[in-house]
Amino acid sequence: MVNETVLKNFFKYVDENQDHYVDRLREAVAIPSVSSDPDRREDVFRMGNWLIELFKKLGISYEAVDVGNHVMSGKTLKLPPILLGSYGNDPKKKTILVYGHYDVQPALLEDGWNSDPWKLVEDSTGRLVGRGSSDDKGPIIGWLNAIEAHQKIGVEFPVNLKICFEGMEENGSEGLDDLIAREADKYFKCVDAVCISDNYWLGVTKPCLTYGLRGISYFNITVSGPGRDLHSGVFGGTVYEPMTDLIILFSKLVTPNGKILIPGINDDVAELKDEEMETYRSIEFKLEELQSAIESKTNIYDNETQTLQARWRYPSLSIHGIEGAFSAPGVKTVLPCKVSGKFSIRSVPNMDPDKITACVDKFLREEFGKLGSENKLQVECVHGAKPWVSSPDHWNFVAAANAVEKVFNCKPDLTREGGSIPVTLTFQDALNKNVLLLPMGRGDDGAHSTNEKLDRHNYTEGIKLLGTYLHEVAAIKST
Ligand SMILES: C[C@H](N)C(=O)N[C@@H](Cc1c[nH]cn1)C(=O)O
Ligand SMILES: [Zn+2]
Ligand SMILES: [Zn+2]
């Protein structure tokens, strides 16, 4: 049984120290730890060091594992350290592994932010706006705040905690799978279950536990031809233009209503069974919540079930951008000599990353051949991760559901997630343990988008939720 007095004191302490936690998040957001930008790599290291200082303050023993180098945009860069922390080592207690990431997506004021993305600001409704607030700095700091609160109220921590924080999640989690394989029987040996707080509620009111993720295959397709950028007046009409070829290729990938046109891609999608249909009926989700999150009525489907299915159990293809293309304001009449188009495919059971790459490569080469262009095409899958679906019946999920009831006074929805957290399946397979996704933020947080936020309420209740989950884990029979 969980000691209710302990929880009451813990909740009270968290409530009374909210501003301290917000200040801590503010410090973290101020470090622009963008893993996909070579010029920001030092900041990713700075963020790792910031966490190490907090580990030291909280008495968490740690190792900052150097996982070597990688090449990005032609530059050899050091990979940020993977932080492995241990808090407690009592053989009578369960051991929970928590994972999160300290890198973030890029953000520029001119993308449409209402304030500097690296300065956490709180609006009048308690929205804490700043890059990484929800994805994933709020949640990772949430675990550490929960430890600190226990120390301050003088309460024994209910479990042994193993921590794995990486700085490359938004850029393919390089080095992590190998480290987990190496450490499965060492650092990760005593782990009883895994908890990841790195996704979002479905809507804005109801907490959820998540048991599925889509996979991702991220592609770069480069079309090159002329030896340098050219004047379109002087050379336009006389040369094969890389941008024209690329746009034609892009136009062949997907229809406006999301149907992927690459032969073979949809072949392995798991069949929809009656039991799965049942799972959509009980979920509290309204199209209005989606429309509010996307700030428009540009949704493809006019009902909730099809919308959820499109997000969770069918693949999607999104076009993200073109490197090398002129994008600044003004009228530059350039003809770019080399452009790289970026798109990704979110995959679902039973799709396989290698087969996806083979289908994409074959299709693009065939379509490029049809253009009769003298330019060159290069197709590269930058990173690929498999989808993941697990069973929410495990004690790990039951403990989390109990915690949701204690903190939010309601039963959580059981959801799948449209996004990807590549390491989830790795942990499940390498450690042979249950993995639970326990989100802190709301569906309208705008992760990866402009004006990303984490509501103060979600942050503070989230700290309580993570701590209470650990108490529930300690109290539950784990057979
Ligand atoms: C759900 C998680 N917070 C997240 O945002 N994951 C990213 C992972 C990724 C893969 N390539 C680049 N980023 C995502 O789903 O896009
Ligand atoms: Zn993310
Ligand atoms: Zn994330």
Image (tube, grey):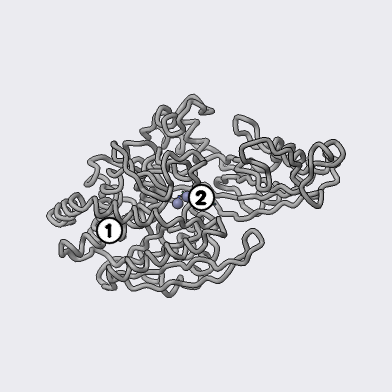
Element class at badge 1: helix
Residue 352's x, y, as percent?
A: 61, 51
Picture residue at 58% right of the left edge, 40% below the top: 316
Cα gap from disc 2 to disc 1, whole angstroms? 26 Å
Closest to the observer: 164 or 230?
230
| Residue visible at 72% across and 51% down in the picture | 379
Q: Are marks 2 and 1 in contact (CB under 8 Å)?
A: no
Specify the quadrant that holds the C terminus.
Answer: bottom left
Percent position of residue 332, x then y: 70, 39
Q: Amino acid at mark 2?
A: Pro
Q: Which residue is mark 1?
A: 145
Give the secondary structure at mark 2. loop
Q: Position of residue 134 (x, y in %)?
A: 39, 48
Q: Residues within 10 Å of mark 1 (few under 14, many from 20)?
A: many
Instruction: Give the class, few, some or many, for how many residues have Cα within 10 Å of label 2's Cα (few <14, many ≥20).
Output: some
Identify the image quadrant of the N terminus.
bottom left
Q: Please, which residue is most extreme toward the bottom here?
A: 186
Q: Position of residue 93 (x, y in %)?
A: 26, 68
Depth order, front residue of 274/75: 75
> Disc number at residue 36?
none
> Residue, x 87% and y 39% (percent of image)?
238
Identify residue type, mark 1: Asn
From the viewer's perspective, tell me whether residue 125 is left or right of residue 186. Answer: left
- The answer to whether residue 436 is seen in the rendering is no
Q: Nearer the viewer, residue 7 or 68?
A: 68
Q: According to the image, label 2 marks what residue?
A: 106
Left/right of residue 226 with respect to residue 26 in the rendered view: right
Judge whether 468 appears above or below 63 on screen. above
Mark 2 or 1 closer to N-term?
2
